[in-house]
Image (cartoon, helix red, strand yellow):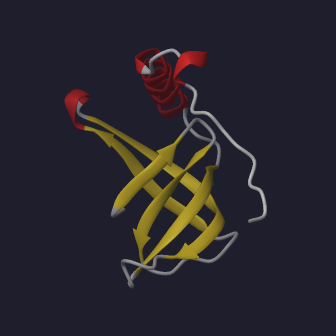
């Protein structure tokens, strides 16, 4: 994995070296150094897009296949903590919008 873009309980999106086909099976690990966690997973490729920046890589979206409880629990905890860190949205900070009009 060159770069994790997104991960959730259902799967993830990552920039990977190599070539992948839609529907192909993959294997990998989610590592979390502060806890010395190494959580293996199996997945199935759902989306593939060649990288425009890294010629030897593809952006893939994948779903987990029968993820173990340890992985699901860790991802659930991680997403809950990230949600707690997000500042509350306020209408005061919502950017204004306008409708485009012909010149």
**Percent from the top left, x then y, of residue 75?**
49, 30
Quadrant of the rendered image containing residue 3: bottom left
Question: Residue 32 or 55: which is nearer the viewer?
Answer: 55
Question: What residue occupies the far bottom of the structure in this picture?
Answer: 55
* Residue 77 drawn at (x, y percent): 46, 21
At 33% from the left and 64% from the top, the residue drawn is 2
Residue at figure coordinates x 64%, y 49% from the top left: 65
Asked which quadrant contains residue 53, the reply is bottom left
The residue shown at (64%, 43%) is 66
Q: Is residue 27 above or below residue 55?
A: above
x%, y% of residue 78? Answer: 44, 26
Q: Is 13 displayed left or right of 101 in the figure?
A: left
Q: Residue at point 59% right, 59% down?
A: 61
* For residue 89, above or below residue 72: above
Could you say which is closer to the camera, residue 54 or residue 96?
Answer: 96
Percent x, y of residue 74: 45, 27
In the image, residue 34 above or below residue 62: above
Q: Nearer the viewer, residue 51 or 34?
A: 51
Asked if residue 53 can be seen in this view, the reply is yes
């Amino acid at each position: 994995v060159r770069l994790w873009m997104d991960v959730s309980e259902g799967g993830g999106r990552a920039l990977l070296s190599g070539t992948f086909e839609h529907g192909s099976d993959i294997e990998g690990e989610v590592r979390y150094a502060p806890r010395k966690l190494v959580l293996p997973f199996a997945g199935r490729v759902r989306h593939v897009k060649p990288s425009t920046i890294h010629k030897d890589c593809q952006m893939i979206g994948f779903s987990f296949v029968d993820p173990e409880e340890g992985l699901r629990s860790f991802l659930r905890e991680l997403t809950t903590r990230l949600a707690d860190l997000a500042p509350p949205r306020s209408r005061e900070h919502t950017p204004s919008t306008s409708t485009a009009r012909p010149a």
